[in-house]
Image: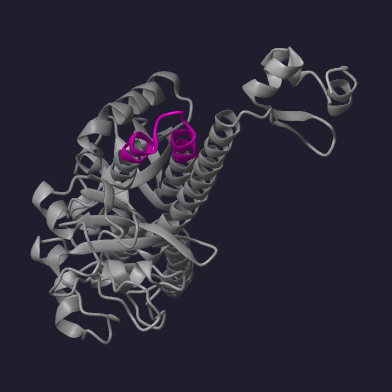
Amino acid sequence: MKSEDDCQTQAAGLRQRAEKIFQQRIVSTCANLESMPLEEIRRIIHELQIHQIELEMQNEELLRTQEQLDCQKERYFDLYDLAPFGYCTVNEKGLILEANLTASTLLGVVRGELIGQPLSYFILKEDQDIYYLHKKQLFQTGEPQSCKLRMVKKERTIFWAHLEAKVNKDVEGMPELRIVLSDISESKFKEDMVELATRLIAQISTPEDLHQRMSSLAVSLQNITGCEAVGIRLKEGDDYPYYVTSGFPSAFVQAETHLCVEKPAGEILRDNIGNPVLECMCGNILQGRFDPAKPFFTVKGSFWSNGTTALLATTTDADRQARTRNRCNGEGYESVALVPLRINNQSLGLLQFNDHRPDRFSPALIAHFEKIADIITIALWRSQIEERIQASEALYRGIGESIDYGVWVCAPDGRNTYASESFLNMVGITQEQCSDLGWGDVLHSGRF
């Protein structure tokens, strides 16, 4: 299909040729007109009329072609420029030859400014080797290639992209790349969250003590989410001090670790039903004081803000459900998220994510934080139950070993569950032998 410029050039050329022929024939005709027979004059006039009709028909055909081009241009605009994926053409040197509007939007650059730029300029430096290998394989094998890498917008915002490319020939037979770009940041983040959840479960299930597990967990959360600082508060008596932190200044942790409000005499201030009063936004989240109608709270009781300075300037203590100490903002943290660790209406603690950079969070990211918190809460709850059982068993065994009587305990199915040393001595068997005996075996041993 001819382009609009080609059609206009063709029409102009036809007109110039027609006018030239007409002028030549008019001059020749006028010079010999007096000596020409009447029939010859009529024939010339007829030919001129036929030429005029032909020109008119060609002009109509050009107009129809132009209309078809306009329709195809609109269709091309819809299919190419407004496609949900970014399309661009790159030459063998890696320079962008053509790009659609979606590619322009993805990279945050006006389309005209993209042309002639190397595509590698918009790829994160650490991932450029992936792109170069990808391009090399394309030109060497001619086989379509795809890869995932991090790209950078004009304002230096990083996003994950999926590239699909194949080699084509241009009108001059030179090879060029046709590349399809798509933003996969959300799906990549979900993959990372699944990986993080798997890692969290593994870390929490390790035989290390709880503090080691929580320390590893805080570092993992910091690395995966990209937040500058992560803290985990856990219940200790009436308070919820920082159990572990990663990335917070030690002075900040020391100043913020305790949340209980104290009376002048040093006693803990309690509300009218005896619960300790916890300060600041952390206290709100831990004690379930939140209003989901406010944009900075979620329905699950989390708090988040991408700009604490603006939040403090536009809200009151009543809006924020309590008086806040504002140390996070005083330390320069603009993005802050607090996610409760809550189960069966009991608060075990909270996760805290802080960053000096604004606009670090989104509703989707906070929802992922809450899923992470659910995993951690269940693991902590299970760990606490196991610790209580172990403590109870230790106490139980201590009592059994401290008395002179033999103590033997079996389950309802007759399986032996405990035997004190005094009992084993009385029966004359070892602990291992006792484990294999049921209550009937022991009763019929002849020693009772």
User: Which image quadrant is residue 386 in?
Assistant: top right
| Residue 80 can be seen, yes or no | no
Does 16 appear in magenta?
Answer: no
Instruction: Kindly identify the residue that appears in the image at 73 percent across and 12 percent down.
Output: 429
Q: Residue at x 29, y 66 (%)?
A: 282
The percent coordinates of residue 29 (x first, y second) are: 31, 68
The spot of residue 134 in percent (x, y) is: 37, 27
Q: Nearer the viewer, residue 229 or 29?
A: 229
Residue found 18% across the figure and 84% down from its top: 314
In the rendered view, would you say 199 is above or below 420? Answer: below
In the rendered image, residue 199 lying in the magenta stretch gets the answer yes
Tally of numbered tags: 0
User: Would residue 257 be seen by someone viewing this image from the given angle?
Assistant: yes
For the point 51% across and 67% down, the residue is 345
Main secondary structure type of the part rendered in magenta: helix
Nearest the viewer among 217 and 417 is 417
Where does the magenta region start and end? 198-215
Residue ranking furthest to the front: 404
- Left/right of residue 105 with respect to residue 323 in the rendered view: right
Q: Nearer the viewer, residue 206 or 33?
A: 206
271 displayed left or right of 75:
left
Q: Position of residue 423 (x, y in %)?
A: 70, 23
Quarter location, residue 235: bottom left
The answer to whether 86 is drawn above or below residue 46 in the figure is above
Q: Quadrant of the C terminus?
A: top right
Task: Indicate left or right for 116 with 421 as reference.
Answer: left
Q: Where in the figure is residue 339, as x and y percent of width and height?
A: 37, 61
